[in-house]
Amino acid sequence: QSALTQPASVSGSPGQSITISCTGTSSDVGGYNYVSWYQQHPGKAPKLMIYDVTNRPSGVSNRFSGSKSGNTASLTISGLQAEDEADYYCNSYTTSTTLVVFGGGTKLTVV
Amino acid sequence: EVQLVESGGGLVQPGGSLRLSCSASGLNVSSNYMSWVRQAPGKGLEWVSVIYSGGGSTYYADSVEGRFTVSRDDSKNTLYLQMNSLRAEDTAVYYCARERGTYLYYFDYWGQGTLVTVSS
């Protein structure tokens, strides 16, 4: 069982916005502004989309944005496009011995 | 351009050993925090190990502590993961990645991964 909880799947239509949640505890998501998000297409390596809750690496579309409230972080994708269909993972710093924790992943379907 | 290229994966019997390599270009493994992250078939991501820059302190997930060893060869700019006493549950794609962040938790560069299958 993953340390961070994500919905197994979400879906949206092209042009719409969707939000993926990532729930942890005060030892990880809630305690620090150190949450990141990754996009993974089938058979490919994960790609960093958001770090430090809200920051986008150079080259990542501004359609991707991050936020956090309490123990839950969120990734919002606006103006959905077909190529956004992928798996999305959150991860956070943690004070546990694990040092790094990931969410279980969310499959985004663009219908 | 940063490139990380893993190799060394394959089929190994339970209890066996395997050494993975991650050859880096565009960054120096010695001056970066380098990690291994794995993904079992159809499953999520799991952090495995990290080696710190400079002095090279190492840390491991509880699931591999005592069985896996991370190291690097600065002259070859290559990261390694020595995996011993392998179990079926170690079957996964293993990625090397650069770890970043004030508290070291996110990964900005990833290799393409190498598949390790533990089966008799």
Image (cartoon, rainbow, N blue to C red):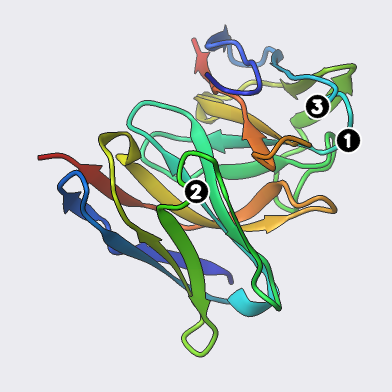
Whether labels 3 and 1 belong to a single chain: the reply is: yes
User: In front: A11, or B64?
Assistant: B64
Q: Identify the image quadrant of the N terminus of chain B.
A: bottom right
- Is residue B83 shown above or below A107? below
* Amino acid on which the number 2 mark rests in the picture: Glu
Q: Chain of mark 2?
A: B
* Left-right relation of B66 to A56: left
Mark 3 burial class by Cα count in 10 Å: few <14, some 14-19, many 20+: many
Above or below for B39 versus B58? above
Image point (15%, 47%), residue name: B13
In this rendering, the count of numbered labels is: 3
Query: Is there CB contact under 8 Å for labels 2 and 3?
Result: no
- Give me the C-alpha separation between circle 2 and circle 3: 25 Å
Given the image, what chain letter belongs to the residue carrying mark 3? A
Observer-nearest of B17 and A88: B17
- The residues tagged by marks 3 and 1 sit, at their Cα atoms, a distance apart of 7 Å
Residue in the foreground of this view, choosing between B1 and B23: B23
Residue B112 shows up from this direction:
no
Which label is found at residue B85? none
Please name the residue that numbered disc 3 is placed on: A29
Report whether B30 appears left or right of B8. right
| Residue type at the position of mark 3 | Val
Q: Are marks 2 and 1 on the same chain?
A: no
Instruction: Output the chain of dot 1.
Output: A
Name the residue that disc number 1 marks. A33
Mark pair 2, 1: CA separation: 28 Å
Q: Which residue is mark 2?
A: B65
Q: Residue at x 25, y 58 (%)?
A: B17
